[in-house]
Structure formats: C-alpha cells, structure tokens
C-alpha cells in the first residue's frame, strides 16, 4: 500500500510560509478551549469557520477517518509517534505547568500496550519523561537530539560513520545523542541568554539540554534582537521559532524527522517496507520534519493538531489535545496487536517495559 492520503488530498506547496506563522501560532496558543471561532485578524467568526472547513476538507479529521485508517493498517504494524506540547498537553502560559491530564496519560499508556510508541519533543528528554511518567514508551528529547532507544548494534548514521552509543544500566536501551559535542557551548550560550534577557518582561530561558528555548510574552522585538546578537557569535548554532518561543539549536543535520527514522530503525522496522505504518501527531513547525519523512516514505499517517488553517505537510488533522485524546482512546480500544509484538518483540527484551 502506498502513502495513506485522504481522498481529497491535493498536492500543496511543501514550505511553511513565514508570513502566516505569527498569526497562526499566536492564534492557537494559550487556550484550552476549542478554537476560537473568531478570526485573529478580523474577529469574524464565520470567515474563520469557512476557512477552517475548507482546510479540513484537504486535511480530513483523523477522527472522522479513523475506521478507514485502521482498515488500511490491517495486517501492518502501526508505530505511534507523539509530540508533547500542544499535542498531549494544551499550550499554557507557563511552560513548567504544561501538565498532561490523567485521561491522556491513561490513553497513551493503553496505546503503547498495543503499538510501539515514542514521544518526540522539543523539551529535554528528562523533562518530557517527567511530564508523561510512562515506562512503556520511548522518549526523544531536544527535537530528537537525545533519544533513548532499544539497543541495536552498529547503528550507521551521520554520513555513514558509526555512531558511538552509550549503554544505560538496563543495557536493553541506548542513548543516542548526535549533538553531544555541543553540550559545553550550549551551557555557555544558556548562561549568556539568561543574563541578557533577565530584564525583559515576560522572557524566560529554558534549558532543553541540546537546545535552548527563549520564551517571550511581550517585547518580542527586543528579545529577538538580543537573542540574535548572542547567536551570531556562535556560527555552529542557529535560531528557529515555535509558539511564542525562539529556539537556539546546534546546526546539525538532525531533526524530528531523523529521530522518527532512527526510532523505526532501532525498533526493528527499517526493512519492513510496506508493513509498517508510522503515525505521527504533532502541532508545531518542528513536527513538519516528521510529516515530511512520513510523506517521503510513502506510507503512514502524518496528523497535525491545529484549530486554525495552517500550511502543513500533514495529511490529516485533529483540532486540539482533546481530539488527540479521543483519537488515542479509539486507537487504544482498537487493540490491534502489532505483528512485531506478536512475534516476540517483547520477549527479546527490545520493547519498552509495560507499566
Ligand atoms: O516539541 P514539543 O514537545 O511540542 O515542544 C516544543 C516546545 O514546547 C514548549 O513550549 C510551548 O509550550 C509551552 C507550554 O504550553 C508554552 O508556554 C510555549 O509558549 C510553547 O512554545 C517548551 O516549553 C519548549 O521548550 C519546547 O521547545
């Protein structure tokens, strides 16, 4: 089977335009409610709904398409990838309080019992693990630059060079950290940014191990200027933007898309061809890299979480974390045992521990 496109899908431009992101990202931030049937620009409820409806026609609801998706996934292994902020937890003002609901945790736990499941977040791996608190999922932090994955020997990455892997205590999982050499510099930049932004109202610098988030709530212009002036001095780093956040990242060829491929590989699905269907749910721009990989594999389900129309590589959509919850509950209930689990995935000690 080929790429799981919704029937009404039309090929769209692959880039995410800079011009729309401010309105879009700020528009669906800081709300736990269903989106705003109000346009951020015109305050016009009808205009937004009709825009949204025509966008959804091109990116059908993953809930509405659930049965069809599961039918297409019959006799295949669905591997589930989940973003954290804005996907499993609602976007809230205080990044330290982006808690996941008890229901969401139970739904993810249930899904992970039946499908290999990984969470790929921009947060540090430890932090996202702390929020999620599940033992039966894999975690990739720092936008995929810090992965705890099943142990597989001789993993070839980075221009074909062997990647050195460090075994953790259990020795069934290994740490993969392609940006490790940048750690001391990242710490240095973190301290400078904290110092330079401490007087800017609403600014908050977050240490995400292999990347740094600088949150802004006001004074965006001044903050951007300061952050840029710091990053300019570090040619091996660059700046990206998320939802009311600037992110400093090492300039390596590694993103959430690479992390998805790496995890598929280490989970034992690299040669599974048509038999594996990666399903990725995410809401932000960094998730587009994972959507792109699913598209280029020609198989799987890239699902964007958005309550406003967005240019995206995803094929399906969910409005907000409450719809993500509904989708995961259905997925968990579908109890489709994956072939790999049935064929002793766990008994080889490769799979995640169940809670
Ligand atoms: O890849 P993700 O798991 O989605 O992480 C991306 C960033 O998420 C967090 O920031 C966002 O969510 C916060 C809590 O809702 C919100 O306050 C902030 O404005 C958003 O940008 C996290 O704090 C960042 O470090 C992550 O990079």
Image (tube, rainbow, N blue to C red):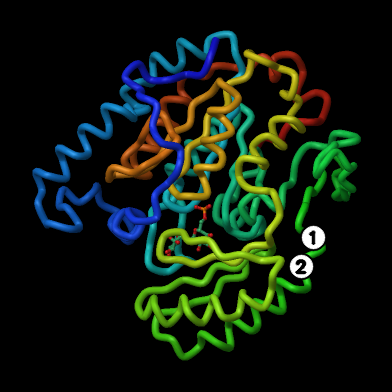
Q: Counting other residues with Cα less than 10 Å from the Cα at mark 2, is it few (<14), some (14-19), or many (20 or more)?
A: some
354 or 287: which is nearer to us?
A: 287
- Asked whether, in this view, residue 231 is left or right of residue 164, the answer is left
Quarter assignment of residue 236:
bottom right
Residue 19, picture quadrant: bottom left
Relative to 12, does residue 345 appear above or below in the rendering? above
Q: Residue at x 60, y 13 (%)?
A: 76
**What residue do we see at 85% from left, 36% from top?**
155
Q: Where 207 sits versus 74, above or below?
A: below
Packing grade of label 1 (10 A; few <14, some 14-19, many >=20) is: some
Which disc is residue 183 wearing?
2
Q: Nearer the viewer, residue 63 or 161?
A: 161
Pointer 1: what residue?
Answer: 180
x and y percentages locating residue 325 in the rendered image: 40, 38
- Label 1: element kind: helix
Q: Nearer the viewer, residue 190 or 171?
A: 190
**Dot 1 and dot 2 residues touching (CB under 8 Å):** yes
Q: Name the element at disc 2.
A: helix
Q: Position of residue 282 (x, y in %)?
A: 47, 42
Residue drawn at x 38%, y 20% is 6
Residue 88 falls left or right of residue 306: right
Going 19% across and 39% down the picture, which residue do you hit? 51
- Across and down, in percent, residue 190 comes to 64, 77
Q: Is residue 58 left or right of residue 165?
A: left
Note whether residue 313 is visible.
yes
Mark 1–mark 2 distance (CA, rounded to whole Å)? 6 Å
Quadrant location of the N terminus in the rendered image: top right
Q: Residue furthest bottom?
A: 199
């Amino acid at each position: 089977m080929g790429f799981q496109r919704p029937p009404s899908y039309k090929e769209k431009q692959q880039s995410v335009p800079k011009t729309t992101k401010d309105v879009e990202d700020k528009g669906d931030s800081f709300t736990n409610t269903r989106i705003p049937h109000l346009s951020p620009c015109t305050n016009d409820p009808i205009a937004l709904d009709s825009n949204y409806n025509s966008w959804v026609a091109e990116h059908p609801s993953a809930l509405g398409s659930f049965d069809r998706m599961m039918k297409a996934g019959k006799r295949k292994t669905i591997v589930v990838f989940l973003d954290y902020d804005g996907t499993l937890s609602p976007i809230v003002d205080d990044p330290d309080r982006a808690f996941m609901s008890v229901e969401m945790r139970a739904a993810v736990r249930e899904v992970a019992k039946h499908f290999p499941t990984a969470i790929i977040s921009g947060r540090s791996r430890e932090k996202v693990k702390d929020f999620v608190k599940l033992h039966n999922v894999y975690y990739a932090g720092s936008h995929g630059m810090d992965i705890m994955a099943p142990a597989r020997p001789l993993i070839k990455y980075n221009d074909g060079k062997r990647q050195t892997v460090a075994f953790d205590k259990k020795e069934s999982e290994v740490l993969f950290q392609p940006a490790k050499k940048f750690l001391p510099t990242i710490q240095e930049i973190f301290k400078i940014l904290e110092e330079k932004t401490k007087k800017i109202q609403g600014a908050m610098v977050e240490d995400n191990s292999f990347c740094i988030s600088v949150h802004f709530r006001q004074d965006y212009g001044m903050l951007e200027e300061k952050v840029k002036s710091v990053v300019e001095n570090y040619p091996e780093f660059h700046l990206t933007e998320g939802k009311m956040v600037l992110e400093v990242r090492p300039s390596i060829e590694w993103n959430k898309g690479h992390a998805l491929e790496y995890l598929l590989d280490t989970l034992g699905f690299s040669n599974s061809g048509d038999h594996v269907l990666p399903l990725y749910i995410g809401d932000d721009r960094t998730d587009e890299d994972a959507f792109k990989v699913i598209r280029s594999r020609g198989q799987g389900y890239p699902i964007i979480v958005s309550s406003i129309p967005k240019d995206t590589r995803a094929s399906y959509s969910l409005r907000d974390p409450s719809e993500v919850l509904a989708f995961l509950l259905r997925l968990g209930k579908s109890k489709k045992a994956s072939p790999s689990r049935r064929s002793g995935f766990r008994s080889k000690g490769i799979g995640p521990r169940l809670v």
